[in-house]
Image (cartoon, rainbow, N blue to C red):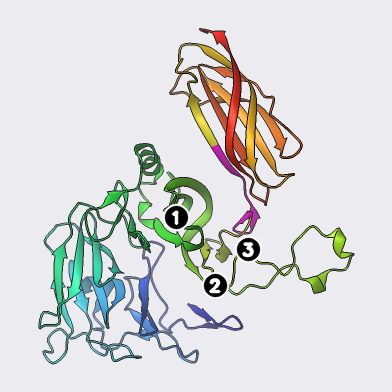
């Protein structure tokens, strides 16, 4: 574990090294500005913000106990899914004594009646505790197929527990993220949003079927969810069938209510945060006449106050996931396609596509590759038979050909100016029944 202040990177790993593996997901957060974290295999630790000190076990924590989840809530640390000696209590929630402002709680002793520390089982449902995340004045505890709201009572009970309506739970730790619309959750069999009430699916049937059909059944617990706040997006990252780490992100734009998908470079985790920026091209570094340069200089794709999505890969390294026309530092190809078009409601005749007239959203010179394909049956994948490199400001249309009962089109671009398609027209002819 390292702490980095932008100038120096200091290791704060404790002397007794961590023993967790890839499936022992870290949870934690900051309470009164002090970091706490656990991996479920080692005692939970905290850091006192002093680079001269390493991570240390949380004060007052029983040396014979472990917790799978640690989360700050109000003035307490809350631990869930507890193991005492060798016995697991998968429904148990423990909480510390209340913290003095600017410090960490000092006790977890539930038997000390002079303190507020305690423990209780959330056992109304038989499914196991997965994770927890604050929502306003409540802590939402996610089990496999249910959710519970934990609220401070200001009496001897300290906390109350209420089951929330609906059957939504969480797929794995790290599969819940806060958004302006509420918590968005990667659940078992659905992706949904809620504000403490009934879960509302944000997937249409086709998107839901694609995601869960491509999710690897063995390593699905390595999925996670992250908000890309600068783009009003939530990324649901998961291992595809046969994969061991996250190789695909289903991305939901909660303002446009649209879905897109991105390949991922073997990602294990991600988060959004502020990042210091040093321009790669500065005016002082130019050696030729300034008119000869096409690159921007002293310019950033984000303002210093913008959140950036940072991803960890198996290299291991950290990558800026979404900056301009690059992804993880590499130019990417983006595409949009429409498959299985019947055209005029006539599925019985073969059509010959002869021309596509696109309306490109982007500057003159932006290049879009336009492809066309056809299939004879609705359930068949199209055979892509034609392509044309279309340049905005130079071309008027794309003369390409494809035939079939059902036609398909695809627009793709690797242009760093990120050309988009506003709309398009198709010209075609009827060829007959076969």
Q: Is residue 188 left or right of residue 286?
A: left
Secondary structure under the numbered disc 3 in the rendered image: loop
Looking at the rendered image, the disc whose residue lies closer to the viewer, 2 or 1, is 2
Q: Position of residue 230 (x, y in %)?
A: 51, 62
Residue with the mark numbered 3 = 301
Nearer-N-terminus badge (2/1)? 1
Nearer-N-terminus badge (1/3)? 1
Real-space Cα separation, disc 2 to disc 1, in angstroms: 21 Å
Say few, some or many: other residues with alpha carbon within 10 Å of mark 1 (under 14 / 14 to 19 / 20 or more): many
The reply to whether the magenta stretch includes residue 328 is yes
Q: Which residues are magenta?
A: 325-336
Residue with the mark numbered 1 = 235
Q: Check residue 123 in the rendering and tell me which mark sits there, or answer none.
A: none
Please indicate, yes or no, whether residue 89 appears anywhere in the rendered image: no
Q: Position of residue 407 (x, y in %)?
A: 53, 23
> Which residue is found at the position 63% from the left and 27% from the top?
356
């Amino acid at each position: 574990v390292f702490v980095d202040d932008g100038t120096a990177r200091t290791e704060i790993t404790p002397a007794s090294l961590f023993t967790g593996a890839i499936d022992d997901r870290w949870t934690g957060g900051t309470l009164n500005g002090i970091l706490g974290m656990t991996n479920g295999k080692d005692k939970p630790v905290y850091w006192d913000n002093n680079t001269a000190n390493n991570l240390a076990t949380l004060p007052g924590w029983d040396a014979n106990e472990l917790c799978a989840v640690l989360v700050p809530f109000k003035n307490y640390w809350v631990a869930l899914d507890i193991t005492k000696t060798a016995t697991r209590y998968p429904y148990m929630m423990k909480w510390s004594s209340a913290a003095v402002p600017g410090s960490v709680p000092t006790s977890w002793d539930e038997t000390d009646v002079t303190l507020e520390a305690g423990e209780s089982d959330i056992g109304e449902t038989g499914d196991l505790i997965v994770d927890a995340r604050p929502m306003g004045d409540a802590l939402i505890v996610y089990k496999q197929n249910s959710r519970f709201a934990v609220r401070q009572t200001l009496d001897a009970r300290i906390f109350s527990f209420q089951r929330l309506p609906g059957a939504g739970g969480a797929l794995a730790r790290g599969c819940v993220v806060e958004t302006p619309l509420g918590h968005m959750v990667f659940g078992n069999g659905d992706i949904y949003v809620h504000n403490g009430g009934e879960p509302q699916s944000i997937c249409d049937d086709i998107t839901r079927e694609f995601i869960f059909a491509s999710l690897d059944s063995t390593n699905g617990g390595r999925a996670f969810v992250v908000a890309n706040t600068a783009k009003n997006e939530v990324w649901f990252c998961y291992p595809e069938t046969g994969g061991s780490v996250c190789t695909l992100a289903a991305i939901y734009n909660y303002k446009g209510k649209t879905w897109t998908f991105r390949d991922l470079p073997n990602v294990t985790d991600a988060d959004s945060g502020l990042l210091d920026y040093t321009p790669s091209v500065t005016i002082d570094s130019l050696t030729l006449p300034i008119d000869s340069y096409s690159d921007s200089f002293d310019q950033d794709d984000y303002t210093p106050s913008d959140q950036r999505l940072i991803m960890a890969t198996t290299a291991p390294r950290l990558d800026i996931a979404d900056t301009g026309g690059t992804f993880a530092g590499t130019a990417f190809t983006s595409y949009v396609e429409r498959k299985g078009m019947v055209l005029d409601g006539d599925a019985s005749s073969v059509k010959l596509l002869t021309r596509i007239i696109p309306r490109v959203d982007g500057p003159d010179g932006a290049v879009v590759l336009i492809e066309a394909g056809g299939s004879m049956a609705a359930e068949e994948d199209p055979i892509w038979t034609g392509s044309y490199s279309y340049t905005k400001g130079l071309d008027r249309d794309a003369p390409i050909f494809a035939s079939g009962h059902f036609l398909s089109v695809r627009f793709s671009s690797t242009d760093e100016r990120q050309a988009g398609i506003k709309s398009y027209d198709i010209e075609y002819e009827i060829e007959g029944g076969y």
